[in-house]
Amino acid sequence: MLGLSNKVNAAVYDIRIEDPETEDCDIGNSVITPLNPLCGFIPRTITINPGDQLRFINNASPASHAPSSDPHPTHETYPALNLEVISPGGQAITAPLTQSGVWGCHSHQDAGYRCIITIRVPAGGGAAVIDKNPPKITNLKADVQKDKIVFTWDTDEPSSMQAEYGLTAEYGNFIPEFPNIMSQSHHEVELKNFWFKSLLTGKIYHFRARSFDSSNNLALSEDKTFVIPAPIAPAVPPPPKSKEEEEEEEAITTLKEVKSKLNYLIIKSGFEFKNKLVLGSQGRDVFYLQTLLAEFFGVYPEAQMTGYFGPLTEKALQRFQKKYGITGNGSPSSTGYGVLGPKTRAKINELIHPPKF
């Protein structure tokens, strides 16, 4: 049945997809002839002008069908015929066709549903292909996600969509396997499941987009790359501690608590340093000084509270003097470097007993 539009130079022709008259319909090949007269494209042959439209109407029940170009299953002869799946119950899809020639078509779901479409050469002769310009591909991206990669791009006219990818710029893999869907200008293709899991982590993959327009002009995008990141290894818990290690940690914790209490008691008691302390001094004042330098001022990492003013205590006191700008060089006799003299005593007493206002 032909349905002509009101336009002078264009027409819309209907091809119905009907239930076949026999179940023995799949002839299983991609040749244009012979056609099985019992299979469900009606009419099975049609002739149109460049620019006319074919409207495929699916009256079959309950099957869906996707009109596709020969050969099956690659559909590569005339990709403008590779259309979306049409649901049953009278649903339809329209395809504008421009390239002159004789084209075989079939249902991708059942290759026995077949037709032949002849597109005349334009009046007066001339080039068979009216549009010689391939689509322009822009905004090509690869979004690498946890369980898939989403390739997206745009074209300046409705086109098919297919992405190529591989470890080199030779690619070698296609997603989807065969190009289809001519009716959109924004394209989104997902690489997932088995194909995603087969990718190697840490490797650089090349990819590009492929798009045919309705005149069979092929556009290839620039080459781009993506990387599958290596999975983050789960944190390995530390090995269990031995009894000796636990006892040592407990002892260290106890010692820290004792030192902290000593600092508190020294400061709380109102104690003040009044005597000069030098290398070789010993007694309660030295013990208090070592405790404060280790725990209160944090300049005595060795924290050996022995009550004896040795080289480690001297170095800790020098760090304190540098930290608070009292002196930073010289000797005990010239600048009091490493000696608890008047200036250093006054600073420590000020810090442990700040003035009250």
Image: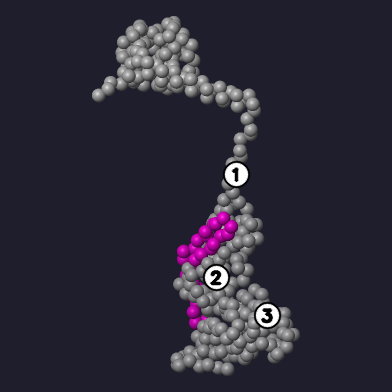
Whether pointer 2 and pointer 1 mark residues with C-beta atoms closer than 8 Å, the reply is: no
Residue at x 61% of width, y 65% of height: 174
Residue at x 31% of width, y 14% of height: 346
> Is residue 181 placed above or below 313 in the rendered structure?
below
In the rendered structure, the answer to whether residue 111 lies left or right of residue 349 reads right
Closer to the camera in the image, 86 or 53: 86
Q: Position of residue 124 (x, y in %)?
A: 50, 91
Query: How many C-alpha atoms fall within 10 Å of the one at disc 1: few (<14), some, or many (≥20)?
Result: few
Q: Is residue 140 magenta?
A: yes
- Point out which mark residue 110 bears: 3
Quadrant housing the N terminus: bottom right
Q: Residue furthest left?
A: 357
Residue where numbered disc 1 is placed: 234
Q: Is residue 154 magenta?
A: no
- In this orientation, does residue 69 appear? no
Of label 3 and label 2, which has the lower sequence position?
3
In the rendered structure, the answer to whether residue 301 lies left or right of residue 338 reads right
Of label 2 and label 1, which has the lower sequence position?
2
Q: Amino acid at mark 3?
A: Asp
Q: Which residues are magenta?
A: 124-153
- In this orientation, does residue 227 appear? yes
Marks 1/3: CA distance? 49 Å
Q: Secondary structure at mark 1?
A: loop
